[in-house]
Image (tube, rainbow, N blue to C red):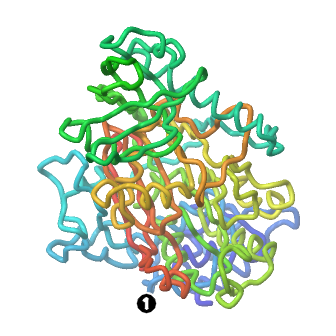
């Protein structure tokens, strides 16, 4: 291929097994004949050299410094059609970034009413927004796809950013990989739900003076009652009231929510097996509680998120689906090419929330839509695509329901055979869900299968596929990523319920539903990041119109976010 830009030089060098210093690549790009200069530098480099230095390049250029002063040839097209580049070091990526900055102007924002400064880095993807109607916004916002405002990223074009791995920190909590004890026995399910009750009830005991259900039955009629329990049943009465049966470790007790009570609308949000608290009054015969107040574990309204102490960003993506005929390779190439530009220098972390590959046998007639039919070949292909990401980027991955792990949640991280395939960048692989703390910002990563259940059970204004972040609000409110057992939700019984949200995260990141949406809930940023797969025949049959080729870019120092479109 013609070596018209340093990024292409980096790719060509990598294909020959070489990395290069940034200035060395710049010198090659400035040569009268970059291709010839590169070949000579490779030929004359020492046999044991794996990295071209400035000295290696200058040794084959006439005068060295004169070549550096020569004008760089401009590229005539974008990089989306180029071949997938191999892994690159930080030096090589920086070199490519420096020259690609002048190759093209940024496209306009999604509204078409304004454009970014054409002097900033290119090729920049379109900036757009999602469903952010519930997010707190400020006067300097731009317009989003749905006409609602979103706060733009404060420093998305900071070309002076220095990528310093020594300043990074990344910790993972709640990883249950290798710790599964479940065999499916009934008593193990009891253990899981008891652990759920114990931990969530602790979050509620500060608001109510809980009495066990067994003790409530012995109280005098008309007594005030506080009760914490898992929702065992919800049904309407002939008069239109709601009867909610709560269960604790001592038994069950019926609680009646009158239809004219303000809390009646909250009953519509209840899911089976979630933990709630009620306050009310016992009936005269002590057989039922008339509910006055209903409490969810919830995120405290006083929650104050932590931020990074420097400007650094994380890209949040999910549902790559390599192996599908509908995988968007061109969009992926555009995304990874952009990651090599100066504009993307602050993006030092990439968090992938499941479904790396399309999988095999996940839904009816899936084999007719596969581009790669062997599951291991799919992961081999995914690993090659992952190599396009700058080599010094920290990557964290969790599995999803299309991945080659158990379907029941929590899902352990990939096994050793798959880890050996996906060795690019030494990515951190953890379970679904897991909490990843990057530079003081905790990100709860969950693939999101339970969102189907939440959207199916709750009213459309509470949860929908068009606004997936609202369904995520419900999970935050319940402090559990998959509260309802049964239906499509598969639960693996463990000694510990790994799906409980013990600590409030700064960011809640999901995928699965292939829809883009985000917003703030009690200062927690909820993000569903869309997908990298165009609509499949199966999705058409179930009326799913995916949001494809988007990458939310999160400023860890401000928790502001910009969504970039690469199609």
Check disc 1: other Cα within 10 Å, few if <14, some if 14-19, many if 20+: few
Which quadrant: the N terminus? bottom right
Q: Is 556 or 397 nearer to us in this picture?
A: 397
Which quadrant: the C terminus? bottom left
- Which residue lies at the image location 26% right of the left edge and 26% below the top edge? 292
- Which residue lies at the image location 52% right of the left edge and 35% below the top edge? 501
Q: Is 306 or 37 nearer to us in this picture?
A: 306
Q: Position of residue 339 (x, y in %)?
A: 50, 64
Q: Is 144 or 60 nearer to us in this picture?
A: 144
Q: Position of residue 406 (x, y in %)?
A: 75, 57
Instruction: Report whether 380 appears left or right of 369.
Output: right
Q: Quadrant of residue 525?
A: top left
- Which residue lies at the image location 53% right of the left edge and 54% below the top edge? 450
Is residue 484 visible to us here? yes
Please say if 473 is above or below 415.
above
Total marks drawn?
A: 1
Q: Position of residue 320 (x, y in %)?
A: 58, 70
Task: Give the structural element (helix, strand or loop) at label 1.
Answer: loop
Is residue 71 visible to us here? no
- Which residue lies at the image location 64% right of the left edge and 60% below the top edge? 400
* Residue on which the image places disc 1: 76
Q: Position of residue 267 (x, y in %)?
A: 33, 42
Q: Is 395 or 20 nearer to us in this picture?
A: 395
Q: Quadrant of residue 354?
A: bottom right
Residue at the far left: name it. Answer: 139
Instruction: Report whether 116 appears left or right of 339.
Output: left
Residue at the far front: name it. Answer: 285
């Amino acid at each position: 291929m013609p070596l018209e830009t340093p990024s292409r030089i980096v790719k060509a060098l990598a294909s020959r097994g070489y990395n290069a210093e940034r200035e060395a690549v710049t010198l090659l790009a400035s040569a009268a004949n970059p291709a010839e200069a590169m070949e000579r530098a490779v030929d004359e480099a020492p046999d044991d050299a794996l990295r071209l230095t400035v000295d290696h390049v200058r040794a084959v250029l006439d005068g060295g410094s004169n070549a550096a002063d020569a004008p760089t040839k401009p590229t005539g097209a974008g990089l989306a059609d180029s071949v997938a580049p191999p892994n690159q070091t930080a030096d090589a990526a920086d070199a490519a970034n420096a020259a690609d900055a002048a190759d093209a102007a940024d496209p306009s924002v999604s509204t078409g009413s304004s454009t970014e400064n054409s002097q900033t880095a290119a090729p920049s993807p379109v900036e757009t927004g999602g469903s952010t109607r519930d997010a707190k916004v400020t006067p300097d916002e731009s317009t989003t796809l749905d006409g609602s405002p979103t706060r733009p990223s404060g420093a998305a074009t900071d070309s002076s950013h220095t990528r310093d791995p020594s300043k990074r920190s990344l910790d993972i909590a709640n990883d249950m990989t290798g710790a599964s004890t479940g065999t499916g026995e009934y008593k193990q399910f009891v253990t899981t739900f008891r652990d759920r009750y114990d931990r969530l009830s602790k979050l509620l005991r500060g608001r109510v003076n809980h009495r066990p259900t067994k003790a409530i039955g012995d109280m005098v009629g008309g007594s005030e009652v506080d009760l914490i329990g898992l929702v065992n049943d919800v049904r309407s009465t002939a008069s239109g009231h709601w009867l909610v049966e709560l269960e604790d470790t001592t038994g069950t007790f019926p609680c009646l929510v009158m239809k004219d009570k303000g809390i009646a609308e909250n009953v519509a949000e209840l899911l089976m097996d979630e933990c709630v608290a009620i306050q009310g009054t016992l009936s005269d015969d002590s057989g039922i509680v008339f509910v006055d107040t209903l409490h969810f574990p919830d995120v405290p309204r006083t929650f104050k998120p932590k931020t990074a102490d420097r400007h650094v960003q994380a890209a949040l993506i999910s549902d790559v689906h390599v192996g599908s005929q509908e995988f968007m390779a061109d969009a992926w190439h555009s995304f990874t090419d952009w990651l090599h530009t100066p504009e993307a220098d602050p993006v030092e972390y990439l968090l992938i929330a499941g479904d790396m590959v399309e999988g095999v046998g996940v839904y009816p007639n899936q084999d007719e839509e596969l581009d790669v039919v062997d599951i291991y070949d799919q992961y081999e292909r995914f690993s090659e695509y992952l190599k396009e990401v700058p080599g010094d980027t920290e990557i964290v991955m969790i599995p999803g329901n299309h991945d080659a792990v158990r379907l029941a949640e929590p899902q352990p991280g990939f096994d050793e055979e798959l880890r050996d395939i996906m060795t690019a960048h030494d990515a951190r692989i953890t379970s679904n869900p897991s909490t990843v703390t990057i530079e003081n910002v905790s990100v709860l990563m969950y693939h999101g299968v339970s969102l189907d259940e939440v959207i199916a059970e709750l009213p459309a204004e509470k949860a929908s596929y068009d606004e997936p972040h609202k369904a995520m609000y419900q999970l935050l409110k319940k402090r559990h990523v998959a509260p309802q057992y049964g239906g499509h939700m598969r639960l693996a019984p463990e000694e510990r319920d790994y799906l409980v949200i013990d600590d409030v995260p700064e960011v809640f990141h999901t995928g699965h539903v292939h829809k883009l949406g985000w917003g703030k809930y009690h200062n927690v940023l909820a993000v569903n990041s869309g997908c990298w797969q165009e609509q499949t025949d199966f999705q058409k049959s179930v009326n799913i119109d995916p949001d494809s080729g988007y990458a939310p870019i999160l400023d860890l120092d401000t928790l502001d976010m910009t969504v970039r479109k690469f199609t």
